[in-house]
Amino acid sequence: MKFFWIILILFSSVYGMGDRNNRRLDHISLQLHWKYEFEFAGFIAAKEKGFYKDAGLDVTFKEYKNGVNVINDVVSGKSTYGIYNSSTLIEYLKGVPVVLVASFFKRSALVLITKPDIKSPKDLIGKKVMCASKLDMKLNFAPYFKGYGVGLNSFTYIPQTFNVKAFAEGKVDAMTAYISDQPYKLNKLGVKYNILNPSNENLFTLQEELFTSKKEAQNHPQRVEAFKEASIRGWEYALSHKKELVDIIHKKYAPNISKDALVYEANAIDKLILPYIYDIGSIDVNFLHKQMHLFQKTYHIGSKRSLKDFIFKPQRNPLKFTKQERKYIRNHHKISMCINYDFLPVGGMENGKYVGIMADIYQMISQKTGLKFTPVVSNSEEDLLKHLKNEKCQLVSITAKQINNLKSIKTTTPITATYFTLLSKLDKSFIHSPIALKGKLLVVQRRSYKNYLQYYYPYLNIEVENDKNKMLEKVLKNRVYAIVDIDEKADYFIDKYGYGKLKINGFLAKDYLLQASIGVQKDNPLLYSIMQKTLDSIAESKIQSIIDGWRLTRYHKVVDYTLVIGIVIVMGIIFLLMIYYQRKLKNFNEELEKSVAQKTKELRQINDSLEINVQEKVNELLQKDEILTAQSKQAVMGEMISMIAHQWRQPLNTIALKISNIQLQEMISHSVTKEQLLDVIKEINTTIQYLSTTIDDFKTYFQPNKNTTQISLRTLLEKTLGFIDARLKKENIQIEMQNLEDIALNTYSSELIQVILNILNNAIDAYMENRYVADKVISISSQEVGSHVKIFIEDRAGGIKPDVMKQLFEPYFSTKEKNGTGLGLYMSKMILEKQFDGTINVNSKNGRTTFIIEIPTSVKH
């Protein structure tokens, strides 16, 4: 009997202990935004492998059902956490109390699947597109469409059926779909398709975002952090055990989905999370800032809100080590640490001592842990990788996961984030856009930098040079355009190597920040835990203070008086000339002054009128075409003024000559008859009328007009040649009009004149550059082909080089160095393609260049 009671008591204790353990678990729920698929494998792994239970959580999943509003469910408390997309940020900007906990997809999962012949958003115009709603299209695709000039009202919306049947049967031309599973279904059906993916153009939206309510984040911050860390741990497990998770999901959660389909989705999800580039679940604050500003502008909401209350920040707990961690510290007092070679001021050796930003941070870690860090110096990037492989060091002082695919290393949470800075000679202008670097050679010190930059800017031409002195030499000798290095090193590089020779003239990858972390060997989890806990206990402000302390003054004040002296000299010469002519005028006969005074007054009135007229026309020119950028408008203005100057130069010389002659006669003979004076004034008036007529001609050409006009091709060409007649005569260039058929055009004459003028001016410039050409001829001919007309413009100025031909119509590309904007031919191409539905091509061989313009004889409005 006694033995029975002992057994009963023991059973009750065990039962009671189990009951207490169950009660100790916090019951929470996670509302999913879709049906069970591999998209939620990380959360399923955390539940099935006990990671949530280890964190003290009992998690219930809530599969999506039609009509469920995920955000409202979480805010109202029906669910504790939710998975959703960028709508969470929109709702936050509207004032809804939501908090972002983690971000898992780093590329957009939502794409447009289209018929094979639809290659671009432009091809969607007038087509049927199946989607959840117009609002959903605006959220996920509006910036993508805007880049192609396509509005959201350009196609017909068909309600989303959430399957591929309608598309497979040809009932719709395109549909929104998740790239992780829908392509697989279409492949199984043998349906051909094309994919329009905004991610391919670096346009992303959030679609696998873990969020909770503000109330949950404030009242249970430790639980939020525990759920986040367990979920990340689940994703790490799921991505490294895909087959196991496929079996679990198929057997327990989604038996209606085949294993093959889940395997396909698993591989696609891996490409969306990018675990070898980003820390799983990490939040890209820089991207969120850009998306927030986009939403504020698009939806006119939350103009005064910031991300401060949107992103969950865990509370910093006092530093506490476990028994095993304390034992590890006692037994491993010294830690070998691989340091990056030549990496000051971030970190490097100086007089046998490790110094720099990271050295100061490790000193703080030493004070908190008692660990001592022994640097293992690497002479190159390859040398560092070799040391890691041979396990000569237990950690890497600092690394960026995006550029260093170190599979044996596990990185801590980022310490800081950085971008790249351009260092060039002092005479180089500031680079505002990376596209301006196209065709220029850049130099970096690390191959990993080159790979990272060319991933985001594939058009950049970059070479690698380890020696900083050689890098400087290449820049100073114009062998390369600029040095590229991380921002923290830029000031140090200038101060140490290029003070007074280099300057900062641009930035790269500000939208794709490098996340800098400490890397720990994966086979040393205790050291990783110690380092991570210690970093968590250090305030961000202290780390930022260390970084700021190592920054040098970015700009040195240099006073250059060269320009001032030049201006003073020019102004002095002008002043002396003014005194000379003033004294000369005083010597004129008083009677002549009275006679000329009246005419001078009239001339002034005419000049004032002309000046006002010119100013009005200049203002109109600045607004003439919506598709021209500000740089293009300035280029066209320069061409107009140049052509007016050519047309006016001879008449103005005539006026000056007549006045000088009458003055000279008066000074020599002291007698000028009234008839002679009237004749001179008559000739001056005639010349002024010519100048006025010239202004009217240019006024007609540059006046914006969106209506088509009837004009013959010959008349249009003759009118065009009238604008450059002075230039042609000056350069002794002949125009040959050959095979000009009497073709009637219904077209935008001003725009077509602009295109032809640009080509003719380029031909004149080519002859000016090649003075050795004796036979200066520009041939113009035409050919009518059906409803189109071809215009051929040929010069014999030496032709165009093959390497130039490839970039001829690209924006900002020019062979005229500082005298060219690189917009003329690009804008001509845009005008012909967009306004005329025409084309422009060029052939160059045997020293001759022929531009071929093809447009409809009648342009549709």
Image (cartoon, rainbow, N blue to C red):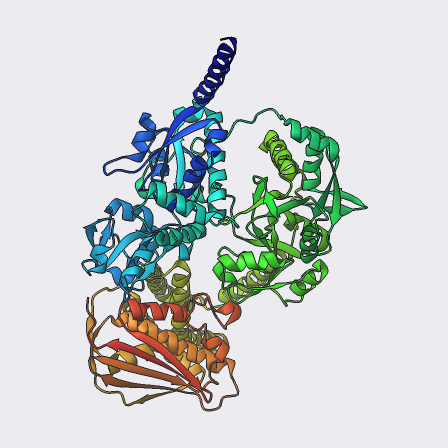
Q: Measuring 67% from the left and 63% from the top, which residue is drawn there?
A: 476
Left or right: where does residue 462 sit relative to residue 471? left
Left or right: where does residue 166 sit relative to residue 531? left
| Quadrant (top left, top right, bottom left, bottom right) of the C terminus | bottom left
Residue placed farthest to the front in the image?
1
Q: Quadrant of residue 463?
A: bottom right
Residue 846 in picture, x, y percent from top left = 46, 89
Q: Depth check: give the residue in front, 404 or 155.
A: 404
687 relative to 340, above or below: below
Q: Depth check: give the residue in front, 249 or 509.
A: 249
294 relative to 2, above or below: below
Residue 566 in picture, x, y percent from top left = 61, 60
Q: Measuring 71% from the left and 35% from the top, which residue is drawn there?
A: 363
Residue placed farthest to the right in the image?
351
Residue 36 in picture, x, y percent from top left = 33, 42
Figure disc tally: 0
Asked if residue 146 shows in the view, the reply is no
426 relative to 161, above or below: below
Q: Measuring 23% from the left and 84% from the top, which residue is drawn there?
A: 784
78 relative to 432, above or below: above
Residue placed farthest to the top in the image?
2
Asked if residue 135 shows in the view, the reply is yes
Q: Depth check: give the residue in front, 344 or 225.
A: 225
Q: Quadrant of residue 165?
A: bottom left
Residue 393 in picture, x, y percent from top left = 71, 46
Left or right: where does residue 40 sit relative to residue 558? left
Q: Measuring 47% from the left and 26% from the top, which residue is drawn there?
A: 56
